[in-house]
Structure formats: structure tokens, C-alpha cells
Amino acid sequence: MHVSVVGSGYIGTTIAAWFAELGHTVTNVDIDEDVVAAVNNGEAPIHEPGLDELMAAHGGDALVATTDYDEVAGSDVTFLALPTPSNDDGSIDLSAMKAAAESLGDVIAEKDDDHLVVVKSTVIPGTTAETIAPIIEDASGKTVGEGFRIAMNPEFLREGFALDDFKDPDKIVIGAEDDQAVETLNRVYEPLVEAAAGDPAIVETGIREAEMIKYANNAFLATKVSLINELGNICKEYGVDAYEVADAIALDHRIDEHFLRSGLGWGGSCFPKDVAAIRAAARDRDYDPVLLDATVEVNDRQPERLLDLLDDHTDVAGKRVAVMGLAFKPGTDDIRYTRAVPVIEGLLERDAEIVAYDPVATENMREQYPDITYADSAAEALEGASAALFVTDWDEFGALDAEFEAMAEPVVIDGRRIVEPRDGIEYDGLTW
Ligand code: UGA
């Protein structure tokens, strides 16, 4: 098949590269000329493990990038994989989606077949049919079902594992209202289903349901982490190890072991944005989402609790404090909504002298906080520090040992259960 993908973020690039690997001809449209040039040179425009190899194999060959929407004309289906960032009130900003829909409509106006437009981006129920489709109708002069079709196909890829998650998904959600759209999407995914190591479920559902499934998935996982964090906070008050409790409740198959790591909480480009959007959407219909409000409140509280724990051990005013890890999770340089920011803010309020270290996210954080000190290694960050706060669970932190000996005061406050308590350090954990 000939598949088009609009957008070259981590979702767009991942699916474009994988569709090419699966044997489809792929056109990737993006407004950024540097990104287009990189893809056509066989280079990955973003950092995602395994992407370099796929891009080298297909970029400029089975996968061709372009800034020109006209190139979409020859394809059977177009996936819209554009960002839907948060507005100030938590609702989503659809401007990139709307602009793409209009450009796509202009191309569809000239096509004489039934082009399928698939919304991949995370959007509030109703958006595909009530906002995106009418823009395409206006621009193309055609109507849904007569000239083009629409579908919604949400994505569940994790940053840092996007390629692995794509090739072996738990489920593929196909939201559509007509059989031809369902059939086309099934054909797109057929080679993936055949090659997958597991047995992915194909969920055929309505467009609004598909839109909601994405929010429900992320809201559920964020709430699961906040619930184990709330239980973890209570554990801490009673001298109970929340990880032992989590390991035991995980044995109940109705709970399972995933997303039960308590600590500093969740960040990144997805959970904060998606939980905010679905809360705003609920309020828009006069529904008060009390549990999702609490999910966010518990998450906001965790960095404060880490700093309170630090205060219990030492007064950091005027002292050097190491912030260990800046990325919102290991395996990425993404610092969006990272828990490191409220931790840094709390240390600045306490007049601490901050030295921060992260294996890959330093340059991103330097743009936001140019005046704090950045170390080139974990050892350099710990040297002379009166306290170390562990914010991201990078594997290399678990291997630290003699490096702690160079601290001025060996106070170690762990927000991620990544350091083993040992003789010679004053160790405390957030929920254990
Ligand atoms: C998340 C979802 O897991 C993906 O399925 C989804 O496709 C993606 O959002 C998206 O909407 O695009 P991601 O943001 O890459 O993926 O990150 P996760 O691996 O889910 O981690 C999210 C946060 O939760 C991280 O800050 C992590 O440290 C935290 N977390 C996770 C915990 O604190 N405890 C846990 O047990 C698990």
C-alpha cells in the first residue's frame, strides 16, 4: 500500500519508518525542511532507540519525506500525527491539526478516489468527526463517505520504547463508522499483525470511542501511579516499605505489576497533557472529575515530600546539593513536566547551591536554568555535595558506590528507589 504520514514527531517518525519496514511505500509530510532533509538522507530526525537503523534502511527509498502536500495524492491513506499541545486551561490546541486538515482537503479536492484520513493524534471525543472532517469538507468540496473517509487510530507508544511498542502492540484500535475505512486500516496493519511476536487484539469501534480509549488508557495509568504514590506516602508514615507492599498486591492478576513503582511521580509530554485535557473536557460538560483532579494533586505533592524529607536530614542553605537525573524518565532527554523542575525550584527557595547531572538531558535543562551548575558525570556531581537527590531512575545511578565517599555530607534522598542503602551514607527513600 501507499501510506502517507503527516508529522515527524516521535509518533509520526516511528510509524512512518515502521510502515516502510513492513513493506508499504511511505510519504512523510512535515513543514520543517531540516527534518525532511534528514529523513531523505536516511537519518533519524529524533532520538529513539532503533530508529537510526530503520531510517538508514528506508529513508530516501521506501520512505520519502516532503514539505509538499501534493505528494500525498498518490497514497491510499493519510495518518495525521501532529502535536496537540495544552492550552492554558488544559484543553488541546488543534491549530496544527486544523492547518494540516485544510492542506489535505486541497489535495483531496483533486483526487478521484475515496481517500482515507486517519487521526493518530490524541484528540477529545468528537474532534475527528466534528472539527477535522468539516475542515476537509470545506477545503475539498467533498463530503465524508463521498470523496473521502475518516477514521481514528490512537497510539500507545512509550517514548524511548516507541519502535518496540509499535512492532509488538497489545492492541490496535480502529475507530471508524464505515466498513471500507475498517477494511483499509486492517490492510495497513496486516503485515504488522503477521510479524508481531504476540497476538495483538484488533479493537474495531466507533470514532468517538477510539478517541476516548487513548485518554482512558493514559488517565488510568497516571491514576495507578498516583494511587501507589498515595499508598506509598501512607506507608512511609507508618515505617512500611511500599515496594514490598506493591510486589505483593501485584500478584493479584486484577492489579498486575506494571506502573506500581512509587516515588516522585509522572511527567513527560503525554500524561500531564492528556490528564489535563480530559479533566477540561469533563468540566466543559459540567462533570466534576474529582478522582482525576486528585491524580494530579498527589503527583504535584511528591516533589514537595522529597524536599520535606531532605529538610528532616539537613539544612541545605548555602550548601552544595546534587540533583541526580533531569529527564522525566530514563532513556530520554525529554524534560517536559519532569519532576526535576519542582525539585530544582524547591532547592532554589532553600538557597542551596545546585549541581545537576543527567547522562543526556543536561543541555535541555541548561536552556531553562542557565545559572545552575551542571556536572559531566555522576561522580563530579556528588563530589563535595552535602546532599544528593535522586530524581530519575537511570541505571548508572544504581551502580554508584565509592563515588558517595567524595560527598561532604553523605545525605542521599532517593525519589526512585534506584540507590541501594549502604554503610557510609545517610539514606532515605520517598515511600519506603
Ligand atoms: C505514556 C504511555 O505509557 C504510552 O502508552 C502513551 O502512548 C504515551 O504516554 C503517549 O500518550 O504518547 P510515556 O509518556 O513515554 O508514555 O512514558 P511512561 O513510560 O508511560 O512513563 C510516564 C511517567 O510515569 C514517567 O515519568 C515515569 O517515571 C512515571 N512512572 C511510570 C512512575 O512513576 N511509576 C511507574 O510505575 C511507571
Image (tube, rainbow, N blue to C red):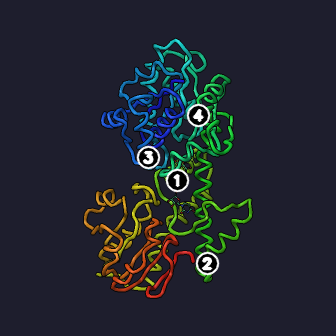
Would you name the residue on which mark 3 appears? Answer: 87
- The kind of residue tagged 2 is Asp
Q: Nearer the viewer, residue 382 or 84?
A: 382
- The kind of residue tagged 1 is Phe
Residue 206: where, in percent of width, then height? 66, 33
Residue 241 badge = 2
Cα–Cα gap, marks 3 and 2: 39 Å
Residue 294: where, in percent of width, then height? 58, 62
Neighbour class for label 1 at 10 Å: few (<14), some, many (≥20)?
many
- From the viewer's perspective, is the residue at label 1 or at label 2 nearer? 2
Cα–Cα gap, marks 2 and 4: 43 Å
Label 1 CB, ligand 1: below 8 Å?
Answer: yes
Neighbour class for label 4 at 10 Å: few (<14), some, many (≥20)?
many
Would you name the residue on which mark 4 appears? Answer: 152
Q: Nearer the viewer, residue 339 or 49?
A: 49
**Residue 196 in view in this figure:** yes
- The kind of residue tagged 4 is Met
Residue 71: where, in percent of width, then height? 41, 21
Task: Give the mark nearer the N terminus: 4 vs 1.
Answer: 4
Would you name the residue on which mark 1 appears? Answer: 271
- From the viewer's perspective, is the residue at label 3 or at label 1 nearer? 1
